[in-house]
Amino acid sequence: MLTALLTGCGGTESPPDSGRPATSGDPSGAPSTAPGVDGEADPEQVFTETELKAALPPAGAFGRHAKVTGTDLGLFGRYGGGDWTQCEPGNDLRVEMRGFEGASAQQTVRLARAPENGRIVTVQLVSMPAERAERYLEIRRRLHEACPDVTVDTEAAPVREHREAQEITALGDEALLESSRQTGGDEPDGTLSYAVDVRVGGVLAIVSSGGDKETGISLAARTAQRIRAELYAADRTSG
């Protein structure tokens, strides 16, 4: 059974976009409008970096004042997202996670007009066979269960990181909401951040939204819609 999601939210403002897809404050609550493609698409189909880049959401999907500040192409490599190197129960899972490869396209977006507001999100698309993408999410789930608390060495001082994960229903073929809270070092009161991992067929969408859970879920839903329409040519009725 997955651990419950950390209570509380970072309290940051969502993008000023009244047309964002309907999602629920409870990740396991109301269905999203972004179904998956399992059973409809070739599970072995993979996409190139160029195709993934074209499927990234346009700046307008992030809000009226959003601006794409960077786009990176290359092989998939999950950086950050927790340090499980000191958690012995997760050793085998961690080693397996390093073995995943696939074409990748990632963009960084500034949500607010003023750079000093610091409201940044990233969206990464990764392509691999559907079975491999499914296994990747399973490993993420199991790592959170086996190693909910880890210590991360920093230049300032060791930081304690508590990580939890919860499934989001009806978003893509499957989706996972990851949360982490750091304490110690320069963050004595704890800094909460979120990432949403969505699988649509063999494409993973990884949306990192800092402390704004609602924005992360909303953007993940929009990204899943783009994957359906632009990569799998599925129905476009959900916009």
Image: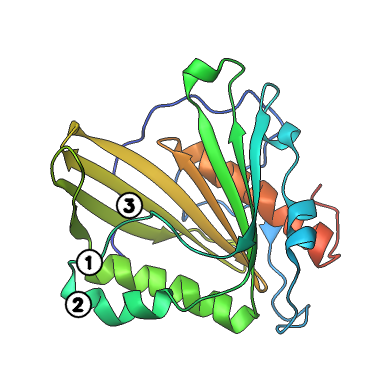
User: Would residue 23 be visible to someone looking at this image?
Assistant: no
Count neighbours of disc 1 (C-alpha within 10 A) and say few if under 14, some if 14 to 19, many if 20 or more: many
Q: Nearer the viewer, residue 174 or 29?
A: 174
Q: Nearer the viewer, residue 29 or 2?
A: 2
Left of 45 or right of it: where is 207?
left
Q: Mark 1 sits on what residue?
A: 147
Asked if the residues shown at circle 2 and circle 1 are in contact, with their CB atoms under 8 angstroms apart, the answer is yes
Q: Which of the two discs, 3 and 2, sits closer to the camera? A: 2
Image position of 187 with respect to 45: above or below: above
User: Could you tell me how far apart the alpha carbons at marks 3 and 1 are, in whole angstroms?
Assistant: 15 Å
Question: Considering depth in this image, is 236 or 203 the residue closer to the camera?
Answer: 203
- The spot of residue 84 in percent (x, y) is 26, 65
Q: Amino acid at mark 3?
A: Leu
Instruction: Name the disc covering residue 89, or none.
Output: 2
Q: Residue at x 76, y 67 (%)?
A: 48
Q: Would residue 188 appear left or right of 58 to someone viewing this image? A: left
Counting from the top left corner in percent of width and height, residue 96 is at 39, 80
Tell me residue 36's x, y (percent): 68, 67
The answer to whether the residues at label 3 and label 1 have Cβ atoms under 8 Å apart is no
Amino acid type of the residue tagged 2 in the rendering: Pro
* Mark 3 Cα-neighbour bin, 10 Å: few <14, some 14–19, many ≥20: some
Which residue carries the number 3 mark? 5
Q: How is the image coloured?
A: rainbow
N-term-proximal mark, 3 vs 2: 3
- Mark 2–mark 1 distance (CA, rounded to whole Å): 7 Å
- Disc 1 marks a residue whose amino acid type is Cys
Displayed quadrant of residue 86: bottom left
